[in-house]
Amino acid sequence: MPSGGQGRKRNLGDVAAFLTYAVQKAGALQRWLPPEKSYIIELVGIAATSTEERLTPPVKPDELASFHGPRDSV
């Protein structure tokens, strides 16, 4: 997964939540506690492109009006 992506953040968060549950509720050893949040943030990293660079340009009204979808051949 790319650095700074939501998928990486979500996956590491899920694993951390599971490990916390395993230790606090299921009796796993303390050594299985997840690392500190600052380390998890470091593992997620920073995205190579900014949010603004990933935005899709909007469709303008005149472009939408000139759009012709697939036509059924009858």
Image (spheres, grey):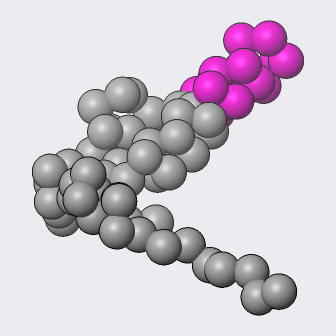
Is there any visible trace of residue 47 in the rendered image? no
Which residue is at 41% across, 69% downward? 67
Q: Nearer the viewer, residue 58 or 32?
A: 58
Q: Is residue 45 magenta?
A: no
Residue 23 belongs to the span the image colors magenta: yes
Judged from this view, the residue extending furthest toward the bottom is 73
Q: Residue at x 14, y 51 (%)?
A: 52
Relative horizontal placement of residue 13, taking residue 59 as reference (left or right)? right
**Place of residue 47 in the rendered image (x, y in percent of width and height, measured from the top left):** 23, 57
In percent of width and height, residue 64 lies at: 35, 59
Residue at left 55%, top 73%?
A: 69
Decide if residue 18 is on the left or right side of residue 63.
right
Task: Left or right? Give the position of 28 relative to 4.
Answer: right
Of residue 29 and residue 50, the one placed in the foreground of this image is 50
- Determine the main secondary structure of the stretch shown in magenta: helix
Q: Is residue 60 visible?
A: yes
Q: Going by the image, does 2 lie left or right of 14?
A: left
Is 19 or 68 nearer to us in this picture? 68
Which is more toward the observer, 41 or 67? 67
Relative vertical location of residue 17 with respect to residue 45 in this rendering, above or below? above
Residue 40, percent from left and from top? 38, 39
Vertical placement of residue 68 versus 55, above or below: below
| The magenta segment | 17-33
Quadrant of residue 32 within the rendered picture: top right
**Relative height, residue 63 to residue 8 (above, below):** below
Query: Could you tell me how many numbered marks the image carries?
Result: 0
* Image quadrant where one finds the C terminus: bottom right
Q: Residue furthest top?
A: 25
**In the picture shown, does residue 35 fall above or below 67?**
above
